[in-house]
Amino acid sequence: MGSLSFEKDFELSAMTPKGLATPCLFPNGDNKRQKVEPPAPRKNLQLAVTEPGFGNDGSNFLDSILVNYLDTLTQRVNFHIGYPVNICYDHYATLAPLLQFHLNNCGDPFIENTVDFHSKDFEMAVLDWFANLWEIEKDQYWGYVTNGGTEGNLHGILLGRELLPDGILYASKDSHYSVFKAARMYRMDSETINTLVNGEMDYSDLREKLLQNKDKPAIINVTIGTTFKGAVDDLDIIFLTLKDCGYSQDMFYIHCDAALSGFIVPFINNVSFASYLILKNSQVINMQSDILIILYAI
Ligand SMILES: Cc1ncc(COP(=O)(O)O)c(C=O)c1O
């Protein structure tokens, strides 16, 4: 692959969210030479919450704070780089009217709600969509939409610990910090596995540590897209390593943290890693992105 030239290969205006920022960073169309200085780093807005009736809480004052904040974000979004999040958020404007309702999806989306002020119908549709993406039959999974990746990791690892109460959590050092937080919260023993230079788990280190703890079950966190390098741990090698080290199917549990690339892997590999996992017939596998789908292997 040839080297990338930023000016040549990226059309910046195509990456700018519609309706938010100026359509082109180089208004006179010369995207080649003109240098655009990013605005100064965002300043702390020095805000304080004021109770009604105390201090300057008039609606004009609040409006000006909001407008100022929107202006700042609109400017900064053009220079946002370094954290792998989607900056194209236009579609949320369509959903804005829903903010006037306090919807509550508490509990299991598969169970009828006692009150009808919820959006579980949509939640189920999202789950089905993901199941389909990952080639899981409709009645072969359970899951719910979480508030984010951390909650997915906490839930998935908790399931592992419930199934294998004295299991040791194995996670590479490039795993998201919420994985190690889960180990501390649940008071689990854990082993940190070294990583290769690309951020992928170092499988020989995994092997060494699995062999050292053969008397205890293994709960393995597999990262499908690490936060900083986007590395995908190789499930094939992990399965083989477990087998080689003598771990039978009832002695391990695998949690896949797919927060980053769970959406991407099915498209780039031309094979869903979920169906791949089911084929491997492991005991229980659970994957999370911002939704959590728990797979019970058949
Ligand atoms: C690989 C991975 N897992 C989990 C998370 C946690 O997600 P959240 O910030 O939504 O809790 C992140 C966040 O960047 C992540 O990159």
Image: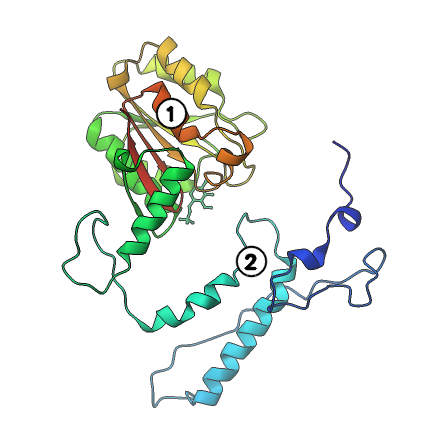
Q: Is mark 2 within 8 Å of ligand 1?
A: no
Residue 177 sits above or below residue 106 on the image: above
> Is residue 208 in sight in this rendering?
no
Residue at image x 19%, y 63%?
116
Disc 2 secondary structure class: loop
Q: Could you tell me the amino acid type at mark 2?
A: Cys
Q: Could you tell me the amino acid type at mark 1?
A: Leu
Residue 144 or 267: which is nearer the viewer?
267
The mark that comes first in sequence, 2 or 1, is 2
**Tag of residue 277:** 1
Disc 1 secondary structure class: helix
Query: Disc 2 and disc 1: Cα gap in Å?
Result: 32 Å
Residue that numbered label 2 is attached to: 88
> Is residue 68 in sight in this rendering?
yes
Q: Position of residue 92 (x, y in %)?
A: 46, 63
Residue 21 or 54: which is nearer the viewer?
21
